[in-house]
Amino acid sequence: MSGPGEGRDPDLAAKAAYGRLRAAHLHAVRAALEDHIARLDWPRERIEHYRDQRLRALLAHARERSPFHARRLRDLDPSSATVADLARLPVMTKQETQQDWDSIVTVPDLTRERAEGILGQQRWFSYTPGGQQIFSSGGSSGVRGVYVWDWDLFVSFACLAWRMQTRQERRDPPLRRQAKLAVLQAGGPPHASTPLFDVATVAGMDTVVIPASAPFEEVLAAVAAARPTHLVGYATVVGRLARAAAAGDLDIQPVRVSTNSEPLLEEDRQAIADAWNVPVHNLWGSTEIGVAATGCGGGAGLHVCEDEVVLERVDEAGVPVAPHEPAARTLATGLANRTFPFIRYDLGDEVAVLPGPCECGSEFVRLADIAGRLDDDFRYPTCTVPASAFRSVLGTDPRIAEYQVRQTATGAHILAVGSPDVPSLIQAIASKLRRQGLPDPEVQVDVVDGIQRRSVGGKLRRFVALKGTDRGTDPPAPSGSR
Ligand SMILES: [Zn+2]
């Protein structure tokens, strides 16, 4: 089947081919969603039994097919391994995953070079002949990463992203309007967020993608025109829309809201409650591990997706700590990722376990909401520029390995490791800043050999904002976020 014009325009033909496979993929997601929703009611023993079997399958497969993991798993017997045995394995860092890419990947026809080639050539999202999708992300550490999601992995992630909402939706009275999901994500490649969240889960639901990095007035107008019944998007963008609604600048009546990609700050959660008084499903995830924990819309915090990911809260030395003890960082093992296994991968974020059962009835362990990094937004006297404005340029340039953005009074000073085209980079960033409302932005880019990391945890501080006094305006109010 081919549409009008496809024969002449190779871009159009590629986009149409993507659309056909994507439609097939979404049917697979909706089929698997039934099983995923049922799992939410599993008792503890069943969750743990399922998780342990999947862990053994992952470890055995990784040891057989990934030279990187074969070395690390040498002294572990996958056939009897449990979650507790993971502590015997070394931590896997982001730098390692990117440097050792070709010895981690488990399929013979995929290399880092080939993945970069796909990212460089595709004009729109695409599938490899093997059904894989290649994504790139700046991530929270400032190191650019290239990732592969195979067919089954995407089905798993999409089910995890949507099963809580869908379960609640089925318990609610049916919607009396045409269901429409407004998707406020990156909007295009190489980010994974749009394919992951542009998923209709209610019968007859339409979806509309609204790129969240556009100037806010454009986002606001597009959301108003879409009249969505459901919203999914960056937490700060959804929060800002809620404030606009409370101020009378946006007239929509959503029945359910889902937030992701950024910490959900208390101020944004409150704004959503004030504007619409609807259930909020927050999500914690990453391009590497996919969806790690999701909010049920009822009880506090986020339920860990224990059936698809193992999280270990560890101290500085990588040794697991008890649930009530503070942890230095979180390690994740993705049970569904067979093509590029992540085993004890350092997510960086600190998480705390919530005690007691949840009002929704699910026995999946809960975490407190993930703490926010408030300093990631730059507040200038005339406007606020979200970190995503920089990240969308710097985090996806294959010639930039690592970067740091320092706010200046009139723009930004950027340190970049790699070999970027500096003049075009300055132009791209300045254009982003102008679109966010900063007049005559001054952008400086220095190519450097390395960037000083924080002594604790070795994490890079990607965004360094000016203090309130330095930028001549009041500092933001405390958020109350943990
Ligand atoms: Zn719950």
Image: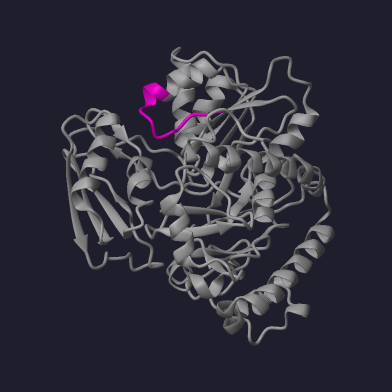
Residue 248 sits above or below residue 108 on the image: above
Look at 69% across and 49% down and name the residue there.
155
Answer whether residue 470 is visible to the viewer in this image.
Answer: no
Q: Quadrant of residue 468?
A: top left
Query: Residue 357 location, x and y as percent?
Result: 74, 48
Residue 300 sits above or below residue 237 on the image: below
Look at 31% across and 65% down and name the residue there.
453
Q: Nearer the viewer, residue 428 or 453?
A: 428
Is residue 10 shown left or right of residue 64? left
Colour setting: one colour
Look at 49% across and 70% down and name the residue there.
101
Answer whether residue 323 is visible to the viewer in this image.
Answer: yes
Query: Residue 441 location, x and y as percent?
Result: 18, 36
Residue farthest to the bottom, as pictured: 75
Residues drawn in magenta: 208-218
Look at 51% across and 61% down and name the residue there.
347
Residue 158 sits above or below residue 213 on the image: below
Q: Quadrant of the N terminus?
A: top right
Q: Quadrant of residue 379?
A: top left
Magenta-span inclusion, residue 180: no
Residue 1 sits above or below residue 156 on the image: above
Is residue 113 shown left or right of residue 378? right
Query: Residue 361 location, x and y as percent?
Result: 79, 43
**How many discs mark residues in the rendered view?**
0
